[in-house]
Image (cartoon, rainbow, N blue to C red):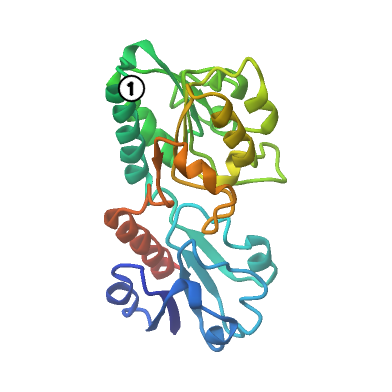
Amino acid sequence: MKILADENMPLVVKLFSQLGDVTLKHGRHITADDLVDVDVLLVRSITKVNENLLSKANKLTFVGTATAGFDHVDVDYLNSRNIDFTNAKGCNAISVGEYVLSGLLLWCQKYNLNPKDLTLGVIGAGCTGSEVIKRAQALGFSLKICDPIKQQSSSEFKDYVSFSEAIDADIVTFHVPLTKDCEYPTYHMLSKEILASANFKPKFIINASRGEVVDDEALLVKLQQNKDIHVIKDVWEGEPNINVRPLIDLVDIATPHIAGYAYEGKCRGTYMLYEYLAKN
């Protein structure tokens, strides 16, 4: 079995060499030519897995991404070619939870806030959102949790509310995948219309999910007009080439999509792919 893997996946050689011959390459530099006669492709979020990349993949049977998100993978195309796929759901959840916790504590200290006096709207109660919820509960925040999909299938949390109720909180934090053509699209959830509304309540906004979940152009206008709104951004529209660069200077914390980039989480992601492939 020939395996091509992103060189930035820790433990990948140690684990996958038990299954086949492993070749490493930087994820940004993987090309269609590299996939000739390759059976397994292992990537992270910087590799766009689509029809163009796989045009010469004559033997490919499995693609795995060692990340929780997988909007960089054309899953429909993989299905059309009967190429098996999995992501590493939840691998970075603890890291993202700690990132958001750090931001909340920073705000409490910087602006003399008491968590017990604040409401926190958590948009998305999956793997990462759940970790944020645990920490927020420990700090004493009143929670407004929005996750219509999970609400239908789980009673894990008692505080489920609508999206409009959740963004009426003092602080709003986003933990959703990027989706467009579905029942609950998340593209520009925090839209121009919402941000421009005179009734927009949140004074604190965190986005550690996907850049396109928030309309960054509209957010820039909002921050330029209202200095009392504070933002923590780990993700950006157009990244790695940020569409709205002036935002960087207007937010309290600006990071380059590294909330889930802890070494522990990366190791967990690699192992989850290994475990899946070994079983299948």
Please tell me which residue is depicted at 72% across the width and 46% down the height of the picture: 181
Which quadrant of the view contains residue 195? top right
Residue 100 pos. (x, y %): 36, 36
In front: 221, or 231? 221
Answer with left or right where residue 71 lies relative to residue 196. left
* Amino acid identity at mark 1: Gln
From the viewer's side, name the closer residue of 268 and 225. Answer: 225
Mark 1, residues whose alpha carbon is within 10 Å: few (<14), some, or many (≥20)? some
Q: Is residue 86 left or right of residue 107?
A: right
Which residue is drawn at the image coordinates 65% and 42% (left, top)?
187
Residue 277 visible to an observer of this rendering:
yes
Q: Position of residue 207 (x, y in %)?
A: 48, 38
Residue 7, position as x, y percentages in the image: 37, 74
Q: Which residue is mark 1?
A: 137
Under circle 1, the secondary element is helix
Looking at the image, which residue is at 27% across and 75% down? 14
Total numbered labels: 1
Q: Is residue 230 above or below residue 112?
A: below
Image: 243 above or below 9:
above
Q: In which quadrant will I find the N terminus? A: bottom left
Q: Is residue 261 left or right of residue 152?
A: left
With respect to residue 204, does 140 lie above or below? above
Q: Is residue 186 visible?
A: no
Residue 10 lies, in percent from the top left, at 30, 67
Residue 156 in which image quadrant? top left
The residue that appears at 28% across and 69% down in the rendered structure is: 11
- Would residue 219 be found to the left or right of residue 180 on screen? left
- From the viewer's side, name the closer residue of 217 and 53: 217
